[in-house]
């Protein structure tokens, strides 16, 4: 793209953004200075998660921890509890670690350069560029799925994803890098355009500020882009999930999962190991008696595999004490402790069967 075309592209999308920018709880209003804490928090929450889902979580976090220093002083269990339901729980642990580093080592002030931001826990290439641009107006190439779609259509890139990712990133960089004027607004304008106009299905091409130069539109192939390779079927994993009760009051036995496990650090029902063979009969992780198979099964989809867990009812031996990682919770409190979605599904099946 020559310099004149680059100027036209940026001017057109920024003029559109000034009229149509989305109002989001973490986004500074026009003319206001962005809050780096809000920008960082939203970027971490939005990884693999939609804007609609993140909104309520963001509000709860900033109400409970108004500043990065407040979040740094929070107990990790409280942070994990508030995060429950957002998934990808390593993000919550890294969020807390990052808050502590920024608060204790950087006096509560985020670095303002991409190369420094990327060294912090939980901040990758995309997030570091996004924070640098939006929070500090630094030149940066911010490329998410929305931006990839805009670039694929504007430049008529027919190579399918994910093979085209590098090319799309370079095309976006040819417009973004080196620009010091309104870097944050430009990054957000591209994201807003992809979210509201250049949508995956039925793009509103006639309303697009980039329509005159869009090669995909000129060739009549915009809606087919970006092309994607056929997805491989997800691997399947199987196991058992245990509904262990205490006879005296009906309390349910939960465990805090090891940080290295899936859903690490979260409270949940006790499960067996998750195996790839549905015919395996995994051993219970604790000694139980009077276990009983049910006809109920929990099905849950993670990013890289689908999980099927058969629900087993049981109780501990009368003389056995729970381990330190275990805790008894009465059923009426289960919906208040921030269980991950996988375990909420099991609770719903058992409580309302």
Image (cartoon, rainbow, N blue to C red):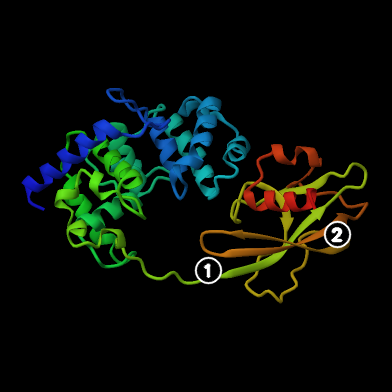
- Which x, y percent locates residue 314? 85, 57
On the picture, is 46 further left or further right than 345?
A: left
Please give the label number shown on residue 349. none
In this rendering, the answer to whether 75 lies above or below 223 is: above
Asked whether the viewer can see residue 220, the reply is: yes
Q: Which of pointers 2 and 1 lies earlier in the amino acid sequence?
A: 1
Calculate the distance from the C-alpha at mark 2 to the C-alpha at mark 1. 33 Å
Q: Residue at x 25, y 35 (%)?
A: 17
Mark 2 and 1 residues: CB-CB less than 8 Å, in contact?
no
Q: Residue at x 30, y 59 (%)?
A: 223
Residue positioned most to the front: 206
Please give the label number shown on residue 234. 1
Examine the image and state in which quarter residue 115 appears. Answer: top left
- Which x, y percent locates residue 257? 66, 51
- Which x, y percent locates residue 132? 29, 38
Q: Residue at x 46, y 50 (%)?
A: 48
On the picture, is 239 further left or further right than 13?
A: right
Q: Residue at x 38, y 34 (%)?
A: 39
- Which x, y percent locates residue 29? 33, 25
Label 2 environment density (alpha carbons within 10 Å; few <14, some 14–19, many ≥20): some
In this rendering, the answer to whether 38 lies above or below 248 is: above
- In what element is the residue under mark 1? loop
Residue positioned most to the top: 32
Asked whether the viewer can see residue 112, the reply is: no
Please give the label number shown on residue 288. 2
On the picture, is 324 further left or further right than 92?
A: right
Examine the image and state in which quarter residue 109 appears. Answer: top left
Label 1 environment density (alpha carbons within 10 Å; few <14, some 14–19, many ≥20): few
- In what element is the residue under mark 2? strand
Residues 22 and 129: in front is: 22
Residues 53 and 164: in front is: 53
């Amino acid at each position: 793209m020559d310099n004149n075309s680059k100027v036209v592209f940026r001017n057109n999308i920024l003029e559109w953004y000034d009229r149509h920018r989305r109002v989001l709880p973490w986004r500074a209003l026009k003319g206001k200075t962005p809050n780096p804490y809000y920008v960082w928090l939203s970027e971490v929450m939005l990884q693999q998660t939609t804007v609609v889902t993140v909104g309520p979580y963001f509000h709860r976090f900033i109400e409970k921890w108004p500043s990065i220093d407040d979040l740094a002083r929070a107990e990790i269990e409280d942070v994990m509890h508030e995060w429950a339901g957002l998934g990808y729980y390593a993000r919550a642990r890294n969020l807390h670690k990052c808050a502590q580093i920024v608060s204790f080592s950087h006096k509560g002030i985020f670095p303002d350069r991409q190369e420094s931001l990327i060294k912090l826990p939980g901040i990758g290439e995309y997030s570091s560029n996004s924070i640098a641009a939006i929070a500090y107006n630094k030149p940066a190439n911010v490329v998410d799925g929305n931006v990839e779609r805009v670039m694929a259509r504007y430049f008529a890139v027919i190579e399918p994803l994910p093979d085209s990712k590098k090319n799309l990133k370079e095309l976006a960089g040819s417009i973004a890098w080196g620009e010091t004027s309104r870097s944050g607004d430009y990054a957000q304008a591209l994201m807003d355009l992809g979210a509201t106009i250049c949508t995956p299905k039925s793009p509103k091409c006639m309303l697009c500020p980039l329509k005159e130069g869009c090669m995909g539109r000129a060739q009549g192939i915009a809606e087919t882009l970006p092309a994607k390779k056929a997805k491989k079927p997800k691997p399947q994993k199987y196991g058992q999930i245990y509904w262990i009760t205490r006879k005296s009051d009906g309390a349910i036995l939960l465990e805090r999962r090891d940080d290295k496990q899936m859903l690490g650090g979260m409270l949940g029902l006790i499960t067996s190991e998750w195996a790839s063979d549905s015919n395996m009969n995994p051993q219970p992780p604790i000694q139980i008696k009077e276990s009983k198979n049910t006809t109920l099964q929990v099905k849950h989809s993670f990013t890289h595999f689908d999980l099927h867990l058969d629900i087993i009812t049981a109780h501990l031996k009368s003389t056995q004490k729970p381990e330190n990682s275990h805790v008894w919770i009465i059923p009426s409190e289960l919906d208040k402790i921030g269980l991950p979605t996988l375990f909420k599904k099991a609770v719903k099946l058992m409580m309302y069967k």
